[in-house]
């Protein structure tokens, strides 16, 4: 990431501005309990992480599987490439479906 930032500061600054916009909008969605918007913003954040090159195929596959199984949004988390992602599942039914889908791809799935 550092090398990309130093090679193209304008690219990095634009990405950072997009990230800050997503964060501000996500805070509002949380305050308003707007899970649909929050899910869309999780997806947008994951796309920014991909552009930043901190995601990887394994995380992308988990995110796609969660979305396909009914998550309203999903994204990688942490510093990247560490295998941690989160999925927003607003109902018990969607949580069970997403958990089942992720268990086929991941050795460990946590639900809260």
Image (cartoon, rainbow, N blue to C red):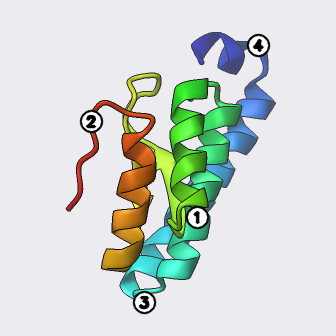
Q: Is residue 9 left or right of residue 110?
A: right
Tag 4–tag 3 contact (CB < 8 Å): no
Callout 4: SS: helix
Q: CA distance from mark 4 to mark 2?
A: 37 Å
Mark 3 residue crowding within 10 angstroms, few (<14) / some (14–19) / many (20+): few
Tag 4–tag 2 contact (CB < 8 Å): no
Residue 16: percent from left, percent from top: 63, 43
Select label 2 or label 3 by which is in front: 2
Looking at the image, tell me whether mark 2 or mark 3 is earlier in sequence order. Answer: 3
Callout 3: SS: loop
Task: Answer yes or no: is residue 85 visible.
Answer: no
Residue 41 numbered mark, or none: 1
Callout 1: SS: helix
Select label 4 or label 3 by which is in front: 3
Residue 84: percent from left, percent from top: 37, 36
Select label 1 or label 2 by which is in front: 2
Callout 2: SS: loop
Select label 4 or label 2 by which is in front: 2
Tag 1–tag 2 contact (CB < 8 Å): no
Looking at the image, tell me whether mark 4 or mark 1 is earlier in sequence order. Answer: 4
Residue 7 numbered mark, or none: 4
Q: CA distance from mark 3 to mark 1?
A: 14 Å
Q: Is residue 9 left or right of residue 97?
A: right
Q: Where does label 2 land, which residue?
A: 108
Task: Answer yes or no: is residue 2 visible.
Answer: yes
Q: Where does label 3 land, which residue?
A: 32
């Amino acid at each position: 990431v550092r090398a990309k930032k130093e090679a193209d500061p304008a690219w990095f600054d634009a990405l950072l501005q997009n990230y800050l916009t997503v964060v501000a909008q996500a805070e509002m969605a949380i305050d308003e309990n707007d899970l649909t918007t929050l899910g869309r913003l999780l997806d947008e954040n994951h796309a920014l992480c991909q552009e930043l090159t901190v995601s990887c195929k394994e995380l992308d596959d988990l995110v796609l599987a969660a979305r396909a199984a009914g998550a309203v949004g999903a994204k990688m988390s942490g510093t990247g490439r560490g295998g941690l992602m989160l999925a927003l599942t607003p109902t018990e039914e969607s949580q069970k479906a997403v958990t089942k889908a992720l268990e086929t791809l991941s050795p460990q799935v946590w639900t809260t």
